[in-house]
Image (spheres, rainbow, N blue to C red):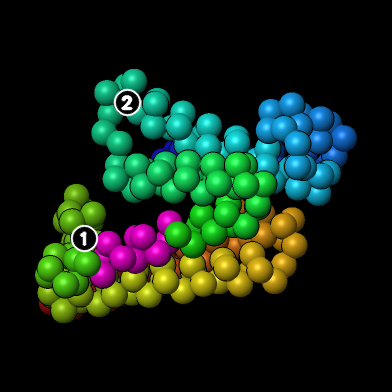
Amino acid sequence: MKLLFDLFPVILFFATFKFAENSPDMAMDLASRVIGDGLTTMTAPVFLATIVAILATVCQVGWLLARGRKVEPMLWISLAVIVVFGGLTIYLRNEMFIKWKPTILYWIFAAILLYGNFVRKNFIRLLLAKAEIEMPEQAWGKLQNLWIGFFAVVGLINLAVAYTCSTDTWVNFKLFGLMALTLVFTIGVGVFVTKYATSRQN
């Protein structure tokens, strides 16, 4: 359920883009009414999808606040990035800004973890505190570095797809490609943690 909640804006972005792409005249008419001039049938879908993604993220935060639940720092960061880069996409009529959004988000996460290394604070260990995982300090350090590398590399991969492929391909990659990369990496992290946690218990 939490995974679906986290992916809510991404799924709506994808669904809106695909719907608008398959109904170009309707998308163009709606986008022109909402955004104004400077659009084409090729760009209208991504602009509409961007608006939906912004609203979806705002609704996520609003729903949590209305229920008196804590909004995680990662969601606040995601909200700020989508508002800024989504807003620039719409205001400047340039879809490259929204394509940069995942990269900026990943690189911010990498920078936070890198900062943790400098101040000798392991944020990954703090995030996994409820799991009560026991590993040597060196293993926790390696795990944080693995996440730093993952965020940095995936950010670069997103840019490579954004600049070398069509918007349609990038939208597919944004949902399925990034999710697949994250899933594969998470499985690898699980193997890593199991290995070191087991050796610690022995």
Provide residue 125's location: percent of width, then percent of height. 19, 61
- Residue 49: quarter of image: top right
Provide residue 106's location: percent of width, then percent of height. 42, 61
Closest to the observer: 40 or 51?
A: 40
Residue where numbered disc 2 is placed: 65
Judged from the image, the secondary structure of the residue bearing numbered disc 1 is: helix
Closest to the observer: 118 or 189?
A: 118
Q: Is residue 43 above or below residue 185?
A: above
Callout 2 environment at 10 Å: few (<14), some (14 to 19), or many (20+)?
few
Closest to the observer: 194 or 53?
A: 53
Q: Which residue is drawn at 26% across and 70% down?
A: 114
The magenta region covers: 105-114
- Total residue callouts: 2
Residue type at tag 1: Phe
Does the image show residue 151?
yes
Report the disc number at residue 123. 1
Q: Which residue is drawn at 35% across and 42% down?
A: 76
Provide residue 4's location: percent of width, then percent of height. 49, 41
Q: Residue at x 65, y 52 (%)?
A: 95
Does the image show residue 201?
no
